[in-house]
Image (cartoon, rainbow, N blue to C red):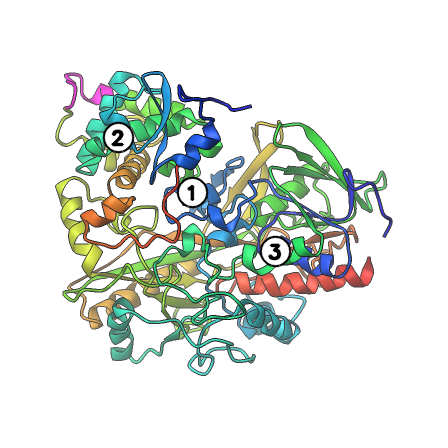
Amino acid sequence: MPRSGSKSGLTRRELLRRGGLGSFAFCVAGAVQMLTPAAARAAGARLEFLTAEELDLVETLGEALVPGARAAGVGHFVDRMLSVPDAQCLLMIRYLDVSPPYGELYRDALARVRRLAPAHRAGALPADIAGRLMRDDAGDWPHLPAPLFYFALRGDAMDVVYGTPAGAARLGLPYMAHIEPPALP
Amino acid sequence: MKRRAPEDAAEVVVVGAGAAGSLVAAELAEAGREVRVLEAGPAWELGDLASSQIAARRLKWAGPVPTLAGTHPVYHNFNAGWGIGGAALHHGGVWLRTQEDDFKTASLYGRGLDWPLEYDDLRADYDVIQAEAGMSGDAKAEIWRPPGDPYPNPPLSVFTQSRLVERGFDALDIPTAPLPSAINSRPYRGRPPCLYDGWCDAGCPIKALANPLVLSVERARGAGARFQSSSYVSRVLTRSDRKRAAAVEYFDREGEARTVAADVVVLAAYAVQNSLILLNSAPGGLANSSGLVGRYFNSHALVTHYGMFDTATQNHLGTTGGQLFSQHGQPKTRAGGPFGSYQWQIGAAMKPNDLLGIANSRPSYHGKALTEFLERASRHLASMNAILEGLPDAANRIEVSDRRDAFGIPVAKVRHSLPEDSLRLVDLVREEGEAIMTAAGAREAWSAPLAYSHLSGGTVMGTDPGRSVTTGTGRTHDIPNLYIAGASLFPTNGATNPTFTVLALARRIGRDIQAHW
């Protein structure tokens, strides 16, 4: 029994098999498609976990951390990874010995970022906000310390911008895959 | 041993399908034993080992996250494995023999603990394993190497990054040698040579690196061993007298609690889980008459040094373990200096992203500064890692925490602090690293914050049942049909990567089971 399908009738397994390099399962116009985070953003893929405002915060902060992250789909990457079971989450936070649920940790952190920018407008945050998180100059963060969130989201943004064949090419490096990056749930 | 119904029993149940567990399974299955291996994570195959740092995170621990404590909390999730192949599925293939004096630090130096065996007891196992794996290296160039057969393959290739850093070692008159690796430098026993594309830590799917899927899982399966994935072991069950292990309790992929009876149980579930399973198996812990289960938890502190060179470094080429190394820091005592050994590994291949990626060599950089740094560093950065001996301390320990996992089982609390001697050794190594990079001609030289790798201890072996958990063959002193395998047995960890010794011990454990059961 497939866990989910698409309008074409493909099973999740078949979708994964057909997926392109570094793609993930996103829902676009009611159908599950295997897309890169950048393509998911461009296609307006449905958010599974984040709110629209949270998506904007991830994209804006991600762009401040790693230029290019917004267009590379850091928001949709984070959204997708926070919507799967924690054991399947591939965000940097998985390495940081933080106890799940990761989604609630990100949600709490984003709310605290939001409070640092009361005049927040879509696509804009105070210029020094990334530095304040890094320096732990962002108030009390009881669940996920601000420097750890800085480190985690910076890692997520690095993944979508540089952790792909296109990202390596951006630096003029050969990617040299044994097995190309797979499609993932 | 008695034969049982296959679905709920096996002669030998091995917990954990990593380097230790899968090799014990292979040895026993080939000896005709009925072996079941329970693995918490998925059933990886070589075709799953995609060249992607993002996808490779699937190979790292995804079970209950321990609570970390102490002044220097270890990196658990990054070090531990998840799935068949275990942590060795994403290891760099750096295989070094434990130094002879590391087996008797208490006797020789009055520090730490003695092992219940000596180097010579493992030498033949090292030799057999390196021949099976097809190790590459130059034994003669390793002036620090304990006695042993030469490597079956010549050294791996050395690229510009390492040659540049080597100049610094040469200038300071510090010897180096090719890094001995369980990676083919030429075709060997039907396996191809390395392509030097730096994806070792994402898992090597071409069989150039002798990970457990290549070295032992295939052997074990071929001899009839059954690997059962998505089976998270929570306890070892005993007979009513608590003197014999009777079964293993685990949770299957649907979250149902099940048991599998066994004549012999081998815990090979990595350092933290081995202790946790014992502590959760009985009030006060199973096999814990010494009170030492969980004690002497240990790790290697890692100091990574970076240098930015004017010359292009080719840092994308090579293997993730490195290309050259130096063990000139092996002598544990130094006049007026801290106690403990260290070694340098030079020239690890780098990727831009991930925990050990180029970007995290400068974790404070972001925005435009990060972009500019990446453009420069991806072509001109070089690195080397110092691995520092961890000094055994009973206060560093694995305990049962107040938190419970999704199955209602208490999770581990891991306490880890570095003693004063280790902190002084870190300072010494940082100074030396900067001197080496500067002497090599680096325009900038800096070191990263401390990291931790190679978790060990918690169920240490020894001769005295009052001062250790197992014998020198991994058999618990209290329960003769309950064995431990893996680095959790290590009384000391020296400054050498543990996998080779884990494998040598696994062969020894297999022989003991074969002889007694």
Q: Which residue is mark 2?
A: A39
* Image-based side of A178 in relation to B445, left or right: right
Which chain is home to disc 1?
Answer: B
Count the labels in the image: 3
One can see residue A6 in this view: yes
Q: Amino acid at mark 3?
A: Glu
What element does badge 1 sit on?
helix
At label 3, counting other C-alpha atoms closer than 10 Å, the crowd grade (few under 14, some 14-19, many 20 or more) is some
Q: Main secondary structure of the magenta part?
A: loop
Q: Chain of mark 3?
A: B
On the image, numbered disc 1 is attached to which residue? B57
Q: In this rendered view, identify the residue nearer to me: B287 or B10.
A: B10
* Residue at image coords 71%, 52%: B224
User: Height in image: A156 above or below B190?
Assistant: above
Residue B265 on image: x %, y %: 74, 48
Q: Give the residues drawn in magenta, as a range.
A: A114-123
